[in-house]
Each structure stands twice: as C-alpha cells, then as structure tokens.
Amino acid sequence: APIFALPKSIARSESTSHALFDALEEYSKSSATCPLNSATQKVVSNSFSLLVSLYSKDTASGIMCESRRLEAVSTWLKEVVSSDTVQAISASQSSGDIYGSIFAALSGGDTASASSLALDGGNPRLSLMLLNTGIQKEMFFRNQLEMWHESGAQPYTPTGILRIFSMASGSNDIERSMFKSDSVSYGIDWRRRFGMLLWSCSSNPQDQVTLSSVVKQYISDVSAGLAPRPTPLYRNESHVPHSASNTKDQCLLYQVLNHHACPDTPLIDIVTPSSHSPFRHDFSAAFHLGAAMTALSSSTLTHHQEDLIVDAVTSQLIGEGLWEWAVYANLCFIGSGAMSQSAAFVRRLRAKNIVSRFYTPSAGSRRSFLQKIGIPPHWFVEADAYRCASEGDALGMVNNLMRFSVANSIAAMEDLIIPSMILEGKESMRKLLPFLELLRCRISDDFLDCWNKPDGCGVIHKFLQLHAQVEKLSNTPLDQIDVDIDHLLDEATELEAILSTAVEDGTTRKSLPFVKIPYGFTRAPHNVVLAELVRMLSFLRMQLLAISNGQQPLHDLDPDSYSSRLAIVLPPDGLYDSSTPMGAESILRGFCGFKAMA
C-alpha cells in the first residue's frame, strides 16, 4: 500500500509548490463546510488561508517580498475580522455613536467604510482625510493630537475622536492605555487589535517593517499587559463554558503567525486541539494542520507526537463508522523529511489490521474507495479469511487464503484443519481427502517443496489416499480383490517411516503468519497428530497383511481404535514431567505432559 504525504515546499520545485498551495486552498474551502463547532470551523478554515498568505512562493526577494507578504496577511486579516467589524459598526449606530462606528470600521481595516460613515455623520473633512493615502494624512492626525495635548484639551475630547485620530496617525498609544486601565471592558479581541498594529506599522512605506517585527511587537504588548491575549475564538462563544478552557491556551491563528516570526516554536503547541477547539481530544483538524505545517516549514513533529495524532484521528474515524478513512489516515505521513522503512511497515500493518477488523463482502463502495487509493486486493481476501476463521469455517478460511498466499493456506491446513479432522475420525478424514486434492490441483510447481515436507500436506494426502483404498478393500470380498497389495504395503511402510522420523525429530513448527486465527478451532499438538497417524498406518499395514495372507480384514473398525493414544507421546516421567517449565502447560487445558507449543 502507498504512503501519502503533502508535497514539501522546501523542495523549492515549481510544480511541487503549486501542488502544495493548491492543496492548502482546497483545505481552506473544505474546512469551511465541515460540520465543526462554528468557532472551530472559522479558525481552521482561516488558518489554511493564512498559511497560503505567509508561505506563498514569490520570485521577488528581500524587502519587496516582505512587503508583499505584509499586504497578503493584511488582506487576509481584514477578511477574517470583517463579520466582527460589521457587528461593531451596527452596535455603535444603534446607540447613536457616530465616532464609535467610524472607529469600528478603522479597527477592521475598512478605511472606505470609515470615510463613508464620517461623511454620513456630517464630518466631510474627516471623511476626506481618512481617504488620503499619503504621508500628509498621518502628519495631520498626529499634529492635531499634539495640539490637543499641549493645549490641555485632550481630556475634554470625546474618546471616540481620540481613538480615530490616534489610529489614523499610526499610533496605538491610546489603545494601549485604554486596555491597561480597564482590560475587562475593552471590547476589541486580539485579531482586530493585532490588525490595528499591523496597519499602523505598515502605513508608512518609508519604514522597512516586517511581519516578524509586528508579531514580536504584539507579543511584547501582551507581555506588558497592553494588548489582549490571543485567546482561542471558541472562548468568545457564549455556548462554550469558561471552565472548558485553559487560560493559557492561545489561538491557532496567533500561533501560526508566531511560528512564522519564531520558527523554533514547537509545532505540537500549534496544532494541539485546545488552540482551536473546545473538545480537547478532537485531533481531526490537528492532523491536517500538522501535515501542512511540516510541509511548509522546517519544523517537525516527533515520531511519538505524529503517532499520537494519527492514532487519535483513527479512533475518531472508526467511532464515526468511517473505518475506510481510518485506513487512509494510517497511511498518511504528516512529519517532515522522509519516512523510515520501519515506520512505513508499522503504518501499513495498522492499516491492514483495520481492514481485517471491519471489512465485509457487503462493503462494496468502501472497498472501491480503498482500491482507488492503492490498497492491495489481497488485504480484502485476507480479511475474508479472518472472518471465516472467527466463524469456525476452516475450509472457507483456507480457500480465501489460497487466493493471495499459497504458503499461508498450506500452513493453515497443516496447523488448523488437518490435526482436528484427523483426530475426529473416519467421517472427517473422508471430507478432508477431496479438499486436499483440490488444494493440490491449485498449487504450482514453485510450492512443491512446501507441499512435500515430511510432515506436510503432501504426506497427509498420500496417507488419506492409502486409507481410502484400504477401507475400500476391507469391504470387498477376497475373491474380487485385484490390487497389488505388496505395492500398498510398501507405500504404508514408507509413510510410516517418514512420519515416525518426524515424530522423533520433534521439529518445532513456526507460528501461523496471521494474527490469532481461530477462536473456533481446537489446536492439537503436532506430535500427537503425527503419533496418531503412525498408529493408524500400523493398523492399515496389518489389514493389508491380512488380505495378502488370504484373511478377511475387519469390515467395521472399532471407533475406540481411532482414539488418540496419548500415552505413547508422554515424557518418561509420566503426566508431570519435572523438566517442563512451570506454567508452560496446564492440566485444565488437557495438554499435561506435552511440550508447550511454539
């Protein structure tokens, strides 16, 4: 199965950059329609569009590149706070506060609306000056503030007018003073306040302002108690209880800006759910944000952090019934650099286990989706095999395993089906023979060595064929028997020698290459099965000798003669072998005296 990852921006390839930013644009659009908490939805969607504004590749360099970044972030921020700006304007107009509505427009970066509101409010000169984009604008407002201060008129000037003139002059001093004196009633959140700082700093083209310097200045104001803390947006929502939030939580948008200014900021602090969601275990957005941030910057997540995020998202998707998307999430690499082979192996194994747990033949659309993203068809076949195993359908399990792994199907036959059916008696053995014949027909020459092992399916197949022939002869009158008995005797002797050697060697069998196969099967120790086959071959040889000597063999064998003679494989010390490690076997399991299975 493939491993998925976002293209890395640091590769600096033109096609790679376009693909990455196209993906970020798609993230922004899709997250805006996701069924998330309203505040979370806004922040997550805005964070992806902010990443585009911050990291878009530009052929220009130096100051020109920085000015374009400032312009892009400024445009983005005006759009982000636009709804809050409209609400603030409406609230001021409702209370008849003309200057309050003008300031609300300016605090949202909407100079055109501020000028229009000033004109409608009977302030044509103010409207004209607000529209002025030259240096004279700031000088006019700054000089007027100085005149009020020097004349002692400032304390008598309405607060709304002072705030307008201060912001238009490119100063945030009045806002700092107001917040410091009464932060509780200060009605502007950190986004608009950060925008006011950004627009005032970048208003003078002669100042070589960088976005990093603006962010660091805002951090300094917050530390000094002069600006609102960048609390997550969901804390401003009335339906979110205050107790659900930690006062130390910082908004995702602020952390993204801060990461751009200070690249050493730990990435896990940015994508933690508390930065954008009141649900502290909801990693759905963190998964995509982590992938985007590691693709764009040099920051990274540790393997533990990445696994934590992926595991959390996997659990969420499975809980929502979207297990096919959980498979995809496990195959996504959200770290930086390249994924190691061992990590990729573990991810594929986890994804495969999800398919094994939840896939059913009726899940056609989900299978189609998974196959489109590159999931191998044999994963679904193996899942069918697991389901057959859990339902006790041994033959169905082997039949499914045969479709993708001959070695696994042979192993399942040897470890699960053959032991139980041999020990169950004649009827089960009769059913086993045609199934082995069918299996043999489907095996290519490449797997003959595996088939013809001394204790493998091939030897069992020969035994069952011999058993069927002898059983048929035992029910045939002596004068009608026209078979080479000596050849059958040689075959029985050869099989008995092969199996006896296997019993003496006591070869330890490897575990099956699939997980916990069967709750519905009884697994017998391998040496018990071999010993039982040796005993039955000895009995078959006696029957053949009787026929060869002209004596009629038994027509109906005593069922007790097929019962397993466990004593022949007990250790010298009897049931309680002192050499057996304590706890290796349990008398309650019925395996007393036998060596623990590998």
Image (cartoon, rainbow, N blue to C red):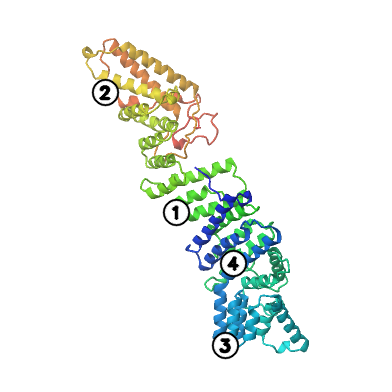
- Closer to viewer: mark 4 or mark 3: 4
Q: In the image, what residue type sits under mark 3?
A: Gly
- Closer to viewer: mark 1 or mark 2: 1
Residue highlighted by disc 1: 322
Vertical side of 476 occupied by 516: above or below:
below
Q: Residue at x 45, y 36 (%)?
A: 589
- Closer to viewer: mark 3 or mark 2: 3
Q: Residue at x 51, y 51 (%)?
A: 329
Tell me the crowding category of disc 2: few under 14, some 14 to 19, or many 20 or more residues within 10 angstroms, Cα based. Answer: few
Foreground residue, 68 or 411? 68
Disc 1 to disc 3, how far (Cα)?
53 Å
Whether pointer 1 and pointer 2 mark residues with C-beta atoms closer than 8 Å, the reply is: no
Q: Secondary structure at mark 2?
A: loop
Q: In the image, what residue type sits under mark 4?
A: Trp
Q: In the image, what residue type sits under mark 2?
A: Asp
Residue 101 visible in rendering: yes
Residue highlighted by disc 2: 556
Disc 4 to disc 2, how far (Cα)?
91 Å
Tell me the crowding category of disc 1: few under 14, some 14 to 19, or many 20 or more residues within 10 angstroms, Cα based. Answer: some
| Sooner in the amino-acid sequence: mark 4 or mark 2 | 4
Q: Residue at x 30, y 22 (%)?
A: 468
Q: Residue at x 70, y 74 (%)?
A: 226
Disc 1 to disc 4, how far (Cα)?
34 Å
Disc 1 to disc 2, how far (Cα)?
58 Å
Q: How many marks?
A: 4
| Sooner in the amino-acid sequence: mark 3 or mark 2 | 3
Residue highlighted by disc 3: 96
| Sooner in the amino-acid sequence: mark 1 or mark 2 | 1
Residue highlighted by disc 4: 76
Q: Position of residue 496 (x, y in %)?
A: 40, 18
Q: In the image, what residue type sits under mark 1?
A: Leu
| Sooner in the amino-acid sequence: mark 1 or mark 3 | 3
